[in-house]
Image (cartoon, grey):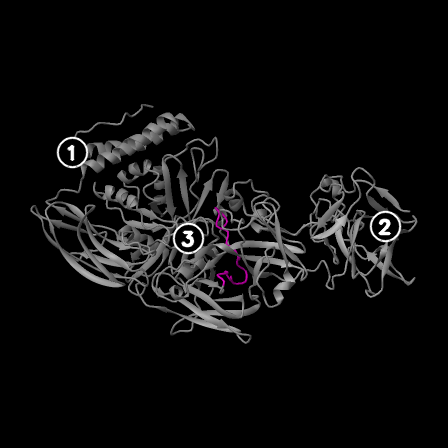
Amino acid sequence: MAETVSGMLSDDGSIHTMAGLQSLRGIPFLFGKRDTPDVLALSPGSANTIVRFEPTSLTYAVFVQVVADRPDLVPPGFGNTAPIDNPSAQSIAGNALGDLVSTYSVLYADGTEVDMPVLRRFGIQQGHICWGASPFAAVPATGPYVYATHAEDIALGRAPRFGYGTAECRTESGRFSQKANLWLYALPNERPDTKVIGIRLRAELEKSWIYAISTTRLQEHPLRLQQRKKLRMRLPTGVDLNVMGELDTDDRGDQIGIDLGTVISARRVLDYDVADWLSDLPDIQPAPSNTEIIVEYAAHPDARIFLRAKDGSLLSQELRSLENVPAAPSPRQLDLKLIPEATRPVQFVIVEKGTSRRVPAKLHVHGPNGEYLPPKGHHRKVNVGFFEDSAAEFVNGLNQYAYVHGHCTIDLPLGPVFLEISKGFETQPLRRMIYISEGTENVEFELEKVLHWREQGWVSSDTHVHFLSPQTALLEAQAEDVNVVNLLASQWGEMFSNVGDFDGRTTLGAKDFGGDGEFLVRVGTENRQQVLGHISLLGYWGNIIDPLCTGGPDEAAIGDPIETTMATWAERCRQQGGLVVMPHAPNPQAERAADIVLGLVDALEIMTFNPRRWQISAFALADWYRYLNIGYQLPLVAGSDKMDAAGLLGGIRTYAKLGAREFTYGHWMDCIRGGDTFVTVGPLVNVTVEGRRPGGRISFPAGGGKVAVQWNVESVSVRTRTVEVIRSGLVVDQIDYDKLSFSGQYSLNITESCWVAIRIRGSVAGRDTDIAAHTSAVFIEVGGRPIFATSDAVAVLAQIEGSIVYLDTLAPKSSEAKQVRMRAALELAHRRLHHQLHHHGVGHEHTPVHSV
């Protein structure tokens, strides 16, 4: 007999002795008893071993086995060739192949036998391998596995199992480098019609170990899985979905599983109303089911699916039964229906109507069961966690999208599929139902640009985007019809983003850098301090303005002192030719007040991550109104602050009037400084006040006069409900309407200095009172008196005083000299605004200001 040993492959603790009945990849194996010899060792020169059993019919015998590690042979004069970081295994890679490890002889009841060679890296492999040294005819004994992402694990109230990045891959094969592996090998029986009474095991050139053997009558290879499939399941009473609308598929939840295969996902059915989908409503969301799920899986044709109820009982059904005409399920069966396989590759081509030019666009396709059908190269479930967005994708509620370059390939089922294609705020979106037949190879869609504001001298922009690569940002800009994207490098504690993309000179997409000059991506920085505030430094030249963040967490790292104020960052940006923007108004409400008073800010940004869920914030606009009301004519800009796939690049955007000037990034910055802008989540709005455009000024003598306010509004699909004429923050006239396009005018009597702008209400979601667009302001001065609202001035002054208090009390000091310089900037702003208050004869109570 061959040697029997205990506890193989325990040198690194990764494989433990298995005992008793075990299931590996859904195959049952009976291991030896614990604490007794339970592993069969085959050594060259030792006697043969015969494993006998009752005469039985079998198609395959499946072995759990491993061969001894073999050090790689290093050619003379060469160093170690094994790509392994573990110093203790530097010479072990597992790349050797072809040597005869052992011979297994199948013994038949008629007295005959058939020898089957077992070759290294074919039917057997060593336990420790490097990446790329997988066996050809054997699979890992465990796996494959499906994991939740970090964000999903946290949503489920549990610690992430794997490191960030690995978890986002969602899958693991079960092959481990530097850890011990066991391998499953299915030995075929060449005479399946003859009874088998045993298997003779003979070592040849190398030592190997066998843990267990199982036999099967399956006609197809027991270790070969079919390609991915989907089925629809009605959940029985007592089975509930988790907080993400899914069933747990890993061993921590184990609500659903397949014996000979892997459940990839089990997610609720999304029911789309076909009539709504084919309507002109701007945003169609499906109804998520709580009783039906779509199960995606890869399995052997003879696999069985299992579902665990709350009481621990199991319901099961053979997948092969689904190939027959479905019958009503029995009480212990599952209610299942196969979904037609998405195996027909179809080329999608998206062109501009009238030119046949391919255009980038945002694309969504789903099947008749609500299942998302992504283009090749895109996620079937888009990751929406922080810093997970790197694949040119977007999630709007329950709808998933991919950004494509006007062309893609999608594997589709035969029959009806439903699609949506969109491209920004000036192009008519498409929602269609199309039929896929066995002959469908290509489908082409035309997008029609129905509004022409770009041709009228307007350019759109997003002032605030994170984490994308510049090339991906350019694709999303083209697909969303955003002419300028500002991709901002920054610091997030101990993490830095997009710093390597900053070079202080390149505008991706510009003609000077090989682009067509119509869509531009420029890397700037968002410099941040948690208490004093954030500041966006756009388009500056030369060296990066650092530190990117200061003053400690969450923005800077723990222990980082406060080294500078936003005022200093702003001054450096201007010296380097850049544009200074105060992002995501109104927060943080602190030093931004001082910097605006000091005249260091070029524009104030309104932000929303996803306008389909949130609209333009009235709170943010109120903060902007406050500065207008004390005489600071700040242009309004918009930024998405996109940090994940649920944030929409350009979902809120700035339109700036370029006019007849050549479109360059530098001229765009000039347009922003000039103030002829509006921000929008859909409707486009043009306004003049007595012929003056936003950013302009009108002067009246004492006594005032009248001005004509004229506007026109156009929208592709977002129906706006109200036009409001705003004077110094108050509505002086409103016009309700229900059209995509609307023009009007209003005669406004002016008796005192003020500002005038237009505000539009409506939303993608159909909420009439949401704010959908807002223009920058025209200033009107009467009798030489500046605009100055004392209550707003007092509120701004309090913010400056609060910033000084922070410097004096909690800000971690770098040095006394820097502390004095930073405080001096804030004191200058405080004195300037304080003097204005007294100039207007206003007395007020001061917030206590600490001395240095």
Say if 217 sits above or below 844 in the image. below
How much space separates mark 1 and mark 2, taking CA atoms? 96 Å
Mark 3 touches mark 2? (CB < 8 Å): no
Tag 3, which secondary structure?
strand
Tag 2 or tag 3, which sits nearer the N-term?
2
Q: Quadrant of residue 188?
A: bottom right
Residue 820 seen anywhere in this rendered image of the structure: no
Q: Amino acid at mark 3?
A: Arg
Q: Please state which amino acid type lies under the numbered disc 2.
A: Glu
Task: Determine which residue is flagged by label 1.
Answer: 839
**Residue shown at the point (86%, 56%) measured from the top left:** 198
Q: Earlier in the sequence, mark 1 or mark 3?
A: 3
Residue 810 in view (yes/no)? yes
Magenta residues?
A: 369-388
Are there few (<14), some (14-19), or many (20+) residues within 10 Å of tag 1? few
Number of numbered discs visible in the structure rendering: 3
Determine the residue positioned at 50% across, 53% down: 390
Residue 739 falls in image quadrant: bottom left
Which disc is residue 265 wearing? none
1 or 2: mark nearer the eye: 2
Q: Amino acid at mark 1?
A: His
Secondary structure found at label 2: loop
Residue 272 is situated, as x and y percent measured from the top left of the image, at 43, 61
Residue that badge 2 annotates: 206
